Image: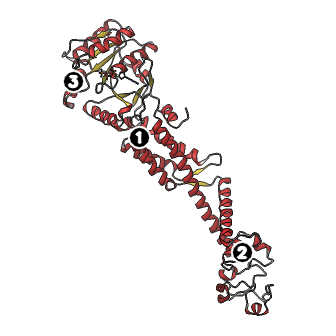
Amino acid sequence: MFDGLKEKLSRFREDAEEAAEEAAAEEADARADADAEAEAATAPEADDAPPATESEASAGDAVPGSDTDAVETDDPTPAEPAAPPADRDAEAEVEEPSATTDHDAGVDADAAGDLEGAGEEEPAGGLGLSRDEAEDEEEFRASFGARAKAFATGGVVIRPEHLDEPLDDLELALLSSDVEMSVAQEILRTIREEVEGTTRAQVQSTGQVVEMALREALVDVISVGQFDFEQRIAAAEKPMVIIFTGVNGVGKTTSIAKLSRYLEERGISSVLANGDTYRAGANEQLREHAAALDRKLIAHEQGGDPAAVIYDAVEYAKANDIDVVLGDTAGRLHTSNDLMAQLEKIDRVVDPDMTLFVDEAVAGQDATQRARQFNEAAAIDGAVLTKADADSQGGAAISIAHVTGRPILFLGTGQGYADLERFDPERIVDRLLGAE
Ligand SMILES: Nc1nc2c(ncn2[C@@H]2O[C@H](COP(=O)(O)OP(=O)(O)OP(=O)(O)O)[C@@H](O)[C@H]2O)c(=O)[nH]1
């Protein structure tokens, strides 16, 4: 179910983890460099570091030693300065030749800096590495050390800007999966907010932090308006009247039949009412379901008054101690005024307890837009999203509740009567994130 979206979300998590780890490691490297520089600035000078003049330091002379005497005598052993020079600067320090016997300099992290000051083609120590290779090696070691330190202390801070690129990709992925624009933006906003300054704990991976933020964002948008359907039925005065709206062909009639069975399984009786008096064949279709489920069907002739059909069904339910009236209506009316007029009249005559909008998951953005339009024309209480078993992107499932402010209550998952499941936001998100 919703495989396309599932795959895209999984890709986002991987990309985000990689990007965040890289960015955090870069920051850790920068911190380590800054620490190293600060240490170098405060560390006492090596005893045997020879004084150097500006001109010698920049000349890149391969001859060890730093004063003109040393050059003249060609003595490879650095001359011990009589006194530390007063004007030592960084350049003088990096003159330390790699060929000296100063092991301290060789093992210190500062040695990387020392190497940089050596002659351009100077081989680095006894490793036989070129200067570039030595730099790479040193960079790797410094970065690895910084990462290890940061990770060991759990001090990896994930910032929203670390995720800029993966979040841009996620936005495109959501839009291409038919998630409505405002919903996609809300998801990104929540993720940014969730990871803002998150310090990843030692026990977590960055992927887990990103996954939790993504989970939170998805649950937030799809659980808008959720309520306990069974509890609502239990609390309602009997018979409870539920009216179904939505365009033809999306599975409205089948959903009514499925819901009748769902209720029966919970000990709740129902009667079916065909308020779609516009469409030829609507009676026959619902009659077949009623016969298959052994339910009473209340129907009038084609062209009759839908409100009158529902009214009769309510009377029948009262007389026969039936708990719920499930009323179909015609969806494809010419204008939203017609639709309003139809639902307003039903409202006036029977005052339904709940109006459910039905549409199909495969309709994607169209389903979301229709949910918005139907809700504007006549307020809905919730939605049933059919054909979730078909190859849909998942955008409508993510978007409808946020766009209308009304929850998706059920998913149609097949053509059989049993193929109706309660829409559980946590469970849907688990599925989308591959946890189920
Ligand atoms: N795969 C799948 N097919 C479904 C689902 N729900 C309905 N269908 C099929 O969709 C087709 C149309 O369903 P109907 O219930 O006739 O839809 P409808 O025409 O909207 O009903 P009306 O609005 O009364 O005309 C039928 O073949 C159903 O079996 C579902 O959840 N999954």
Residue 137 vs residue 57, the one in the foreground:
137
Q: Which mark is residue 342?
A: 3
Q: Earlier in the sequence, mark 1 or mark 2?
A: 2
Task: Give the residue number, with chain letter if any, for mark 2.
Answer: 123
- Where's the C terminus, which quadrant? top right
Q: Residues within 10 Å of mark 1 (few under 14, many from 20)?
A: many
Q: Amino acid at mark 1?
A: Ser
- Measured as percent of width and height from the top left, residue 266 is found at 46, 15
Q: CB under 8 Å between callouts 2 and 3?
A: no
Callout 2 crowding tier (Cα within 10 Å): few <14, some 14–19, many ≥20? some
Q: Secondary structure at mark 1?
A: loop
Give how far across and how far down residue 131 sits, in percent. 67, 72
Q: Position of residue 46 (x, y in %)?
A: 76, 78
Spatial distance from mark 3 to mark 1, Cα to Cα? 34 Å
| Image position of 363 with respect to 325: above or below | below
Q: Quarter of the picture for ligand 1? A: top left
Question: Please, is residue 433 above or below residue 97 in the view?
Answer: above
**Residue at 56% across, 46% down:** 209
Percent x, y for residue 155? 62, 55
Residue 219: tell me if it is visible.
no
Residue holding disc 1: 177
Query: Who is closer to the viewer here, 379 or 128?
Result: 128
**N-terminal of the two: label 3 or label 1?**
1
Q: Is residue 16 left or right of residue 66?
A: left
Q: Where residue 71 is drawn, which disc sits there?
A: none
Answer yes or no: is residue 184 visible.
Answer: yes
Observer-side mark, 3 or 1, equals 1
Dot placed on the residue nearer the N-terminal end, 2 or 3: 2
